[in-house]
Structure formats: C-alpha cells, structure tokens
Image (cartoon, grey):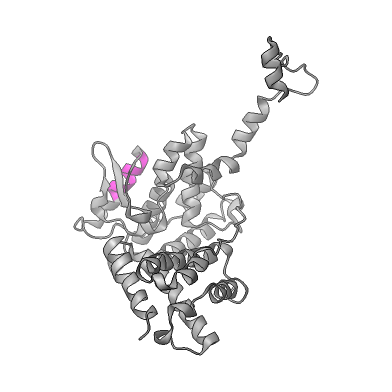
Amino acid sequence: MTAFAPLLQAFFTDRLITQRHASANTIAAYRDTFRLLLAYLHEHTGTAPAGLDIGDLDATRIGGFLSHLEHERGNSPRTRNARLAAIHSLFSYAALRHPEHADTIARVLAIPAARIQRNLVTWLTDAETTALLDACDQTTRTGRRDHAMFALAIQTGLRVSELTGLNLADIRTGTGAHVHCLGKGRKERATPLLPDTIAIMNAWITERATPGTEPLFATTTGRRLSRDAVEARLRHTTAGAAKSCPSLTGKNVTVHTLRHTAAMRLLHAGVDATVIALWLGHENVATTSIYIHADMTIKEQAIAKTTPVGTSPSPRYQPSDTLLAFLDRL
C-alpha cells in the first residue's frame, strides 16, 4: 500500500471525524468527491486506488478531473468548487504529514475556484406563500405534517438539513419560544418563533405524542424524513398550489426558496442585514447581501431619493482654503 491510501484514511478518521467533528453531510460529500476522483484516476492511469501515490495526484491530473466534472458529468461550477474544496482540505492535511511532496501539494493547493455567476434569488410572494400552505391537505396526517413543516421553514428560514434534523424537543413553545437547530459547520442556532407558528407547532407536537428525542417530521412509519422526501413533498404541494395561484406555475420551489422567502420578509420589515445573517446562520454577512441585490423595493426607494431630472442639484463643495484646494487637485 502506498502513502496515499493511509493518508486518505487518516484524513477521514483523524482530521474530519476526530479533530473537526464534521457532520454526516460533510463526510458524505467528501466521500463522494474522493470516490469520483479515484474512479477517474483509475480510468486514466490504469492504477488501482490502493496503488496510487501522492505524486500521482498532481495538479495536471486534478485539473483534468475538475474539467471532467464540468464537461463530461455536466456538474455546475458550484459543484466543481465544492469538489475542489474537499481536495484542497485533503492536501492541506497532507502538507503536514508528507513534506517530501511539498511541491506537488503546493501546486494542487494553487488551483483556483471557478468563478460563479450569481443569479438573483427566487422567493415566494405573500399570495404564493398563502397558496402553498393552503394546498396542504389538513384532513390527512401527511398534509398536517407538511403544513407544519413548510410553515416552520418559511418563518425561520431553516436549511433542509436543519429541518430534517429537528427532534420534537428542539421546538420550545413556552416563554421565549424558539426552534433550536444544529446548523452548517455544526454551529448551534436558536431562531425565535412567531405566535402563528407556535400555534401550528403546538398542534403538530400534540398530534405526534411521542418522546422528545423522536424526529419532529417523520414518515408514516416513524422514520426521519430524508432531504429528497421533503423536496418531493414540496414539489407535490407546489403543483397543487399552482391551481389557485398561477404565478407558481413553472416556478422551481425548493426548501431553499422558502429560506429566501424568510430572508426577504425580514428585509422588507426593515431588519438589518447583520441580524438577518444571524437569523439564517450565515457565517459571513456578505452572504446576506444577495437579498439586498435582489430586492427591487430597496432599489426603488433609492431611486426616489435621487434628484429628479430638471431640478437644480445641491451646490458643489468649494474649498475655503488654498491648502484644501491644493489637496482637492491631487
């Protein structure tokens, strides 16, 4: 066995699991990345994964793998960058353990992320939100579950992984009502609940009538809902809602759309971007700026404050001192 195989194994067991306490989602994403990479290298070098050495994973081959992802597998630049981040993490770990491969490692770490075109975010209007929640058939247990799940997502902006990871005990409906979740990067977050949401959650928790350690949103057999199952239920409900709300027709509504909806509601209510970042669990406030860019209301308010055409602008500043005049000419 060459140096690469024990390195990769130690990266998962030592770095990700023991040191970083990486979430199951992170471990799964990294695992899939290296499965794809090893399969690509086996196909192009003829060397079995266990026989690969660190030197076999040079910048040229890693670059070829990234190109393969985009052009042959049809992956988006965002997915390509996520795969590259996993590879960079492995090679950063390798730099400490295998200094003899410093040159190869440095070249791989120098591979840049692809530029991503940032599209405007999509969110639901108040009419669309009402139609979506009304489309949940509350005469059935599944419909009542979906109604509670979507209402919670729209009010709190939880990610789909956070939503599916909730247990009954994570909903606190007494004084200081909030939902407690384990977010991205295993960061804990508490998000306040509004009275309407509290009433919906109280009704659902009463109906569940199971211990607090059980999943909040479960299948008919009591198992935790998967991410795919939640998205499938949302697509089904959106299709039903489109019958009464035509603007939903053809609209790609995902759980992340509900997250965007929560953010835009806060923005329209005048909540500061830094508070929205805390609410959504954004590590960087700059991430929250996508909602400001997408909001036409804010832009229209900015236009309203500009000087109308045909009016005299405010007098220009004139320095009152020769030294200030000199500085202005620089």
In terms of depth relative to the viewer, which is nearer, 4 or 223? 4
Residue lying farthest to the bottom in this orientation: 46
Indicate whether 149 appears above or below 5: above
Indicate whether 80 appears above or below 198: below
**In the rendered image, which quarter is residue 326 located in?**
top right
Would residue 226 be seen by someone viewing this image from the given angle? no
Point out residue 292 in the picture as x, y percentages from the top left corner. Answer: 56, 40
Point out residue 133 in the picture as x, y percentages from the top left corner. Answer: 45, 50
Q: From the viewer's perspective, tell me whether residue 245 is left or right of residue 4.
A: right
**In the rendered image, which quarter is residue 297 located in?**
top right
Residue lying farthest to the left in this orientation: 211
Point out residue 147 in the picture as x, y percentages from the top left corner. Answer: 40, 53
Indicate whether 9 appears above or below 202: below
Which corner quadrant holds the N terminus? bottom left
Indicate whether 322 appears above or below 171: above
Which span is picked out in magenta? 196-203
In terms of depth relative to the viewer, which is nearer, 63 or 203? 63
- Asked if the magenta segment contains residue 198, the reply would be yes
- Asked if the magenta segment contains residue 27, the reply would be no
Majority SS type along the magenta span: helix
In terms of depth relative to the viewer, which is nearer, 24 or 92? 92
Residue lying farthest to the front in this orientation: 100
Residue lying farthest to the top in this orientation: 320
- Residue drawn 71% across the image and 25% down it: 330
- Residue drawn 63% across the image and 35% down it: 299
**In the rendered image, which quarter is residue 293 located in?**
top right
- Residue drawn 49% across the image and 69% down it: 103
Would residue 187 be seen by someone viewing this image from the given angle? yes
- Residue drawn 36% across the image and 52% down it: 148
Point out residue 47 in the picture as x, y percentages from the top left corner. Answer: 47, 88
